[in-house]
Image (cartoon, rainbow, N blue to C red):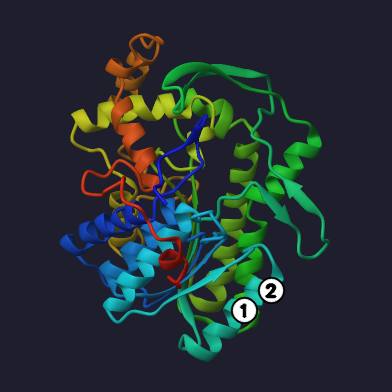
Amino acid sequence: MVIKPRLKGSLALTAHPAGCEEFVKRQIDYVKKSDKYSGPKKVLIIGSSSGYGLASRISLAFGAGADTIGVAFEKGVEGKRVGTAGWWNTVAFTEEARKEGLIAKNFMGDAFSDEIKENVIEYIKKEFGGKIDLLIYSLASGVRTDPKTGITYRSALKSTTNEIEGPTINLEKENIENGKMEVATEEELISTVKVMGGEDWKLWIEALDKADVLTEGFKTVAYSYLGPKVTYGIYKEGTIGAAKRDLERTSNELNDYLGKKYHGEAYVSLSKALMTRASAVIPVFPLYAALLYKIMKEKGIHEGTIEQKHRLLKDMIYGDHKELDSDRRLRPDNWEMREDVQSAVESLWDKVTPENFKELTDYAGVREEFMNLNGFDFDNVDYDQDLDLDELAAKKI
């Protein structure tokens, strides 16, 4: 099978196994060439197959020598379907980690379910040394079934004030379109908080605590995003914003509890704007990211996912540069939010048109990063190669 990229809007419909392997190896190479750090040795990552979670797993394994457990919902070869990018990312990471003598265990399933939590805990007790010292919560999902009630909730990417309109980039058509965001109902707001808020993070910690598998000094970090004024209608004042505030309240509750029982810590970390599979479909965001990339690259402070997460873990969580704000949030987005960066982005924002956006922004960089997420546009991968599905199906994680 020859696999070519197919997009629908800003959604990728295909993934390339060899390209995903290259994507992972380049991140590993970056960490191997960077400064190492003394960090955790037994780590659980919820949402480990792509984006922030995958980069964190790579940094922890190859930068701190950590054994890792990854939880994700991905699929491999099924019939003529070649599998998801996250599946092939996980295959590549697992192979490379095991070459280094590291444990890399994967659980593919619904991270919201009691079953996955129980299976992970059983593995920790029997085969992972009995305890973990870090949990990264980096789950991106639009649907969650509450394990206590059986009710299924669906998140809604909407405003909580007024209808929002703004320019956004369609990666399939390679043009600028007018993105719209409607006002959420109360039910949609509640559902979004149930899916994207802190409830499941807290359930994971409670289950692990009850099972007595947390070490003294245990830490946990959940990833979030705030962004600048141009995205406030989405991230600060929208349904996502309500979920993020719930995540921050959960962080404070967990920090108090873990501090008293384990001398531990819990944080929310605000990430830099990056093109991920989740952020690509958010109105306004791709255009903001394209402008931001241009400015930060010009200033020599641009970071991709692996650069940022390695800095967060090495310098902030396990180093001497915490960078906490007044709300006790870790701020690896500090370079993005610099006044000179944001003023430069704002000055360009009103100058962008459908005719000049490719020249005025770093559209090429944003598109390349998005394609790389799905294993495409690497100069050393042969995309005309006929891949053997049987050989691919034999690869295990």
Residue 18 spot, x, y in % from top left: 33, 56
Residue 122 spot, x, y in % from top left: 60, 84
Q: Is residue 303 above or below residue 99?
A: above
Residue placed most toward the observer, 276 or 341: 276
Mark 2: secondary structure: helix
CA gap, disc 1 and disc 2: 6 Å
Label 1 neighbourhood size at 10 Å, few (<14), some (14-19), many (20+)? few
In this rendering, does residue 43 appear at all? yes
Q: Is residue 318 above or below residue 131?
A: above
Type of amino acid under label 2: Glu
Residue 108 spot, x, y in % from top left: 56, 67
In this rendering, does residue 226 appear at all? no
Mark 1: secondary structure: helix
Query: In the image, what residue occupies the spot 18% across and 35% down?
Result: 300
* Mark number, residue 386: none
Query: In the image, what residue occupies the spot 32% across and 18% down?
Result: 358
Disc 1 and disc 2 in contact, CB within 8 angstroms: yes
Residue placed most toward the observer, 277 or 267: 277
Residue 220 spot, x, y in % from top left: 49, 65
Label 2 neighbourhood size at 10 Å, few (<14), some (14-19), many (20+)? few
The residue that disc 2 covers is 115
* Mark number, residue 119: 1
Type of amino acid under label 1: Asn
Which of the 4 image quarters holds residue 211?
Answer: bottom right
